[in-house]
Image: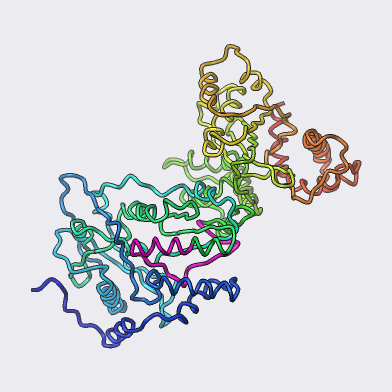
């Protein structure tokens, strides 16, 4: 038998449909129609400028279902462990009602060159998974998935990994317009070398064996190989950012964005790749990217994902609790003192084992609700500006350490750039107070190394532990642990400043004061206004809390020198309560 093709009986309607698509040519009207689907925000003039540009680069647009790119400058290689034996599996059955659609999908892949008949010694089973999107007949679209679990045990994973999402988002400074480009069937555009295709072989329910000529999803090395291609595509352009197949272009104005789009199209043409125009968003002032809403003002969590956290039911098992923490942990950089808040939840996971049943405590319920409350707040992190000085506020408790990194905005108010926190190990919890506070500074600076090392200006560290100031400056005898940390920070250019504990209540307190707030009624110098206001706020709020008065009533019952400030920062009642409880326990 000739294995170059399989003789499969196909419906006449399917064959006619494929022929029609192959004969149809993309037109300007088709480009204009698909562009409008996700770009209603563009003006008529801007749309026409984009249409003109896209007519010039039609070969990088997947306008028709049969349009499929294929990488010309990169070929993926699959490497197995030495002395690996071939793995085989029986085919998975497919519902009789989906058999015809399965045959259509296989024929579609064969027509596009994604798969071809195989005589490989390897075989993995395949199955169909429904997508959320609908096809032209109103049916759920299907995705072909191959179960490569056996093969994955033999594959050596490449060393390249996707970049960290926070590191990517911090590169978006100075941008005012954003473009999101979606590579059409991204993995199926990555060519596999002929020697590796045999490993990807899969067996259909009818017993026929096929192998992928393009990179399939499900392989352990597929994401890394995709990262390698995208890195080749965007590495030399600081205004082009990519996470797997999600590519973002940034610019300061529309003219600059057009130039950036054309540069990206030129790269796509050079690599033989295509984008799905109907899914692309061009030159928008605010976009959702990698679970965050990005704009010129900063970065905040995506409302759709926050809603999932807010509506998450009370966990009944460890697995459900881990799922909730997985969602919450994604936004930990937006939560001050995250590690301290989740401590009761982590304790449940740690203490629950086979002999011990899952027990939901009052402390866990309080932490569960607290996390939801904190994530419900619209927390905006500003884009870092390396040419402005950084302010780092650190704090340590018995069980956790945390810090907030901030910068001054145009109104001379501190705005948060990042929140970080860490749960202390049992050994670290036994450190003396001075060492815990010093460790908080050491860990925070190292954690924020990408911002603080070799910064243009000296950054400022604030701590509420006064002995540390002399410790970092004097040559007095200290423990080896402290000495190691101090020596490790000598490469950083910073000043260490002492601030009273009452003035260091949750480092993010004053960093979220709106720009409209002024302190005209205070006659003191600019340098002393903030500590004075914070000290006054803490003293009065503690007094009113003990009498069960809300903080919003403070301006009416005290002098009105700081009335405008009371209304702005009174929302920190709960945060202050936690801090006050800690201070009272310590005293």
Q: Position of residue 233 (x, y in %)?
A: 39, 56
Q: Quadrant of residue 115?
A: bottom left
Q: Quadrant of residue 422?
A: top right
Q: Can residue 31 be seen in the rendering of this structure?
A: yes
Q: Quadrant of the N terminus?
A: bottom left
Q: Which residue is more in the foreground, 390 or 151?
A: 390
Please, is residue 109 above or below residue 298 in the view?
A: below
Drawn side of residue 236 relative to residue 124, left or right: right
Please, is residue 110 above or below residue 421 in the view?
A: below
Q: Residue at x 63, y 42 (%)?
A: 336
Q: Can residue 542 be seen in the rendering of this structure?
A: no
Q: Position of residue 212 (x, y in %)?
A: 24, 64
Q: Is residue 67 magenta?
A: no
Q: Is residue 270 magenta?
A: yes
Q: Which residue is more in the foreground, 189 or 147?
A: 189
Q: Position of residue 84 (x, y in %)?
A: 17, 48
Q: Which residue is more in the foreground, 501 or 181?
A: 181
Q: Which residues are magenta?
A: 261-290
Q: Position of residue 344 (x, y in %)?
A: 57, 41
């Amino acid at each position: 038998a000739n294995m170059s093709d399989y003789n499969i009986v196909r419906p006449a309607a399917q064959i006619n449909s494929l022929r029609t698509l192959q004969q149809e040519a993309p037109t300007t009207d088709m480009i204009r129609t698909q562009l409008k689907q996700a770009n209603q925000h563009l003006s008529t003039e801007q749309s026409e400028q984009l249409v003109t540009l896209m007519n010039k680069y039609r070969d990088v647009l997947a306008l028709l279902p049969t349009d499929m790119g294929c990488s010309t400058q990169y070929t993926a290689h699959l490497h197995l462990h030495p002395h690996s034996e071939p793995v085989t599996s029986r085919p998975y059955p497919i519902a009789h009602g989906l058999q015809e659609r399965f045959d259509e999908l296989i024929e579609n892949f064969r027509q596009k060159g994604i798969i071809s008949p195989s005589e490989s010694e390897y075989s993995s089973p395949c199955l169909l998974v429904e997508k959320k999107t609908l096809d032209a007949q109103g049916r759920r679209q299907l995705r072909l998935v191959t179960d490569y679990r056996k093969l994955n045990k033999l594959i050596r994973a490449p060393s390249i990994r996707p970049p960290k999402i926070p590191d990517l988002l911090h590169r978006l400074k100075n941008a005012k317009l954003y473009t999101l480009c979606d590579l059409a069937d991204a993995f199926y555009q990555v060519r596999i070398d002929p020697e590796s295709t045999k490993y990807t072989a899969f067996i259909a329910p009818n017993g026929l064996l096929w192998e992928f000529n393009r990179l399939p999803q499900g392989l352990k090395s597929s994401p890394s190989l995709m990262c390698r291609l995208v890195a080749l595509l965007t590495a030399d352009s600081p205004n082009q950012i990519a996470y797997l197949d999600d590519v973002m272009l940034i610019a300061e104005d529309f003219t600059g964005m057009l130039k950036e789009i054309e540069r990206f199209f030129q790269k796509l043409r050079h690599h033989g790749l295509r984008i799905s125009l109907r899914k692309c968003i061009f030159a928008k002032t605010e976009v959702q990217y990698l679970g965050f809403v990005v704009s010129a003002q900063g970065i905040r969590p995506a409302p759709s994902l926050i809603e999932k956290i807010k509506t998450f039911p009370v966990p009944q098992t460890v697995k459900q609790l881990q799922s909730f923490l997985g969602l919450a942990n994604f936004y930990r950089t937006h939560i001050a003192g995250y590690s301290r808040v989740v401590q009761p939840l982590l304790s449940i996971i740690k203490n629950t084992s086979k002999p011990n049943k899952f027990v939901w405590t009052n402390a866990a319920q309080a932490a569960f609700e607290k996390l939801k409350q904190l994530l419900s707040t619209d927390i905006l992190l500003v884009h870092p500006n390396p040419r402005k000085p950084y302010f780092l506020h650190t704090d340590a408790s018995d069980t956790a350490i945390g810090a907030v990194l901030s910068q001054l905005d145009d109104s001379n108010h501190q705005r948060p750039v990042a929140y970080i926190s860490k749960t202390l190990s049992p050994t670290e919890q036994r450190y003396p107070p001075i060492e815990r506070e010093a460790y908080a500074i050491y860990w925070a600076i190292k954690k924020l190394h990408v911002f603080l090392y070799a910064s243009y200006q000296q950054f400022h560290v604030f701590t509420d532990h006064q002995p540390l100031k002399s410790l970092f400056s004097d040559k007095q005898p200290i423990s080896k642990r402290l000495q190691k940390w101090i020596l490790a920070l000598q490469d950083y250019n910073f000043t260490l400043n002492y601030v009273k504990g009452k003035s260091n209540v949750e480092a993010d307190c004053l960093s979220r004061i709106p720009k409209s707030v002024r302190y005209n009624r205070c006659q003191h110098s600019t340098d002393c206004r903030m500590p004075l206001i914070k000290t006054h706020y803490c003293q009065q709020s503690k007094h009113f809390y003990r009498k069960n008065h809300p903080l919003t009533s403070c301006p009416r019952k005290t002098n009105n020198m700081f009335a405008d400030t009371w209304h702005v920062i009174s929302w920190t009642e709960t945060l202050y309560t936690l801090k006050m409880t800690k201070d009272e326990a310590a005293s």
